[in-house]
Amino acid sequence: MKLHNILGRRDMLKCALCGDAPCDMACPSGLKPAEKLRSVWFGNEDTAALRLPESVACRDCSAPCEAACLRPGQVPVKNLLLRLTAEVRPLLDTGLPKDEQALASEICGVPLENPFLLSSSVVASSYEMCARAFEAGWAGAAFKTISALEIHEASPRFSSLKGDSGSIMGFKNIEQLSDHSLKENMEIFRRLKEAYPHKVILASIMGRDEGEWEELARACQENGADVLELNFSCPNMMEEGLGSDIGQVPELVERYTAAARRGAAIPILAKLTPNVARMSPAGEAARRGGAEGLAAINTIKSIMQVNIHSYVSAPAVRGMSAVGGYSGAAVKPIALRFLAELGQNPELQGMHLSGMGGIETWQDALEFILLGAGSVQVTTAVMQYGYRIIEDLKGGLNYYLHDKGVKSLQELTGQALGTVSESTDVLERDSIVFPKFDRKKCIGCGRCVISCADGGHQALGLNEKRQPILDGSKCVGCHLCVLVCPNEAIKGTGKRVWRRKNALCGE
């Protein structure tokens, strides 16, 4: 398997990832270019290349796909398809897998056809939505949190921070719980279980007292739920003592988990809040209360986008806003940190971990799995791109496993936990890895020099050809230059040298 992506989002930033894409309709060879470009966007170029015929008809084509594009001349559809065939396919020694058996997983003994679930949110809030997701290939859904509360949502209730590509990096919501009645939600459960008996329904519930937790748990089990997910983490509740207020108090987590256990015998996951310094105390409390698994993370309390004219943050509701939940790609490092904490805690060994927080691609999902997750949940990426992302989540992960010769996802679960420490004391500090410069890719912009001068150690300069020159006596191997290079012409794979009495010696 290749060690890096040949193509990527930077090659197709103007692609709108259309539904019923005009380029698909215009392709005379029926190659479905939109599908292949979407796979590139989601880091799944290997399978995209393998799904193309070996001899692509694009070379002599007049590219009607590009003419039909909603952004004519801005998306190099033909060139991208040709590069998939000419540059990516030759690197692949493994063909497409014949089945998805390696993706099979489970939640506390409940079988999952793959590890991908919708997380409890608006993306799993009705029969029709869950049915379409199941048809698309999602293994199950954590239904939007059910309660006995009367829910009235604010409008608007979403805001976002976008990257240079226009895609959402950070997402804020002030969404609350399901606005259907308990009776309506139970009818949805029965219909889903009848129509999709092999899909897994996680019933997310939230009560106000022990009686409600017990009653909701019993009702969900009786109406077809396979697993309970106890919402101890929603940051958007109007009433005190709910959601993340519970998750910050281990004694309440234990008490309400025990109440839900009295109401139902099906597996219980406690969904924990990241609005704490450490998540383990709540996780241990959930285990004492009878939970067999944990789900993390829910959204992070946040304020964003204060309008510099009205002075109101977003989303603004008639001149006011509120602290809300932050999610999206930007929170993934925080989610992984909490997941690793839970996975390394000896008091929580054997519990199922369902990971979430910023998952968009199969690589994102694999990072969670490597840190101990047996299942992964997705919301913000679905809100942005739709249920269709499951094709690349499954396809990319399945191809990776097949290419690595991994027979079961469980072989990889938790494999990265031993490489992570909460303390930096374990890190070796006697050597330096110099950056490595690719002169062919360097465009001579000098960004590395500026960053090293103003944010590093003044170890870089430009020669007369505008190529970076490294002063090894000043370089400390921080790799800031690697991160800021706009053309990926600097890699952190150069020569490692060792410090010896103020001198540097080669490895």
Image: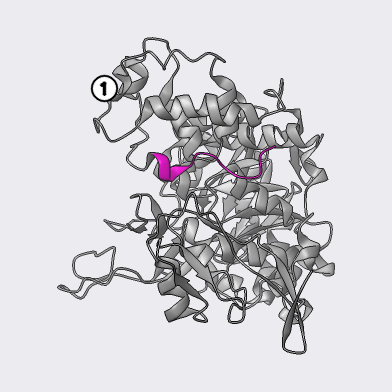
Task: Tell me: residue 478, above or below residue 29.
Answer: below
Place of residue 437 in the rendered image (x, y in percent of width and height, measured from the top left): 55, 59
Q: Which residues are magenta?
A: 1-11
Q: Is residue 71 magenta?
A: no
Classify residue 160 as left or right of residue 394. Answer: left
Per the image, the residue denoted by label 1 is 68
Viewer-closest of 322 and 221 = 322
Identify which amino acid the numbered label 1 is placed on.
Answer: Ala
Viewer-closest of 342 and 86 = 86
Identify the residue shown where x is 45% and y is 33%: 38
Place of residue 155 in the rendered image (x, y in percent of width and height, measured from the top left): 27, 56
Task: Tell me: residue 53, above or below residue 303.
Answer: above
Residue lying farthest to the front in this orientation: 464
Q: Give the quadrant of residue 493.
A: bottom right
Secondary structure that dominates the magenta span = loop
Helix, strand or loop at label 1? It is helix
Classify residue 236 as left or right of residue 99. Answer: left
Q: Is residue 306 visible?
A: yes
Position of the N terminus by quadrant: top right
Task: Tell me: residue 116, above or below residue 62.
Answer: below
Position of the C terminus by quadrant: bottom right
Viewer-closest of 201 and 310 = 310
What's the image's color scheme? Answer: one colour
Place of residue 310 in the rendered image (x, y in percent of width and height, measured from the top left): 16, 73
Residue lying farthest to the left in this orientation: 309
Q: Give the quadrant of residue 357.
A: bottom right
Identify the residue shown where x is 62% and y is 35%: 396
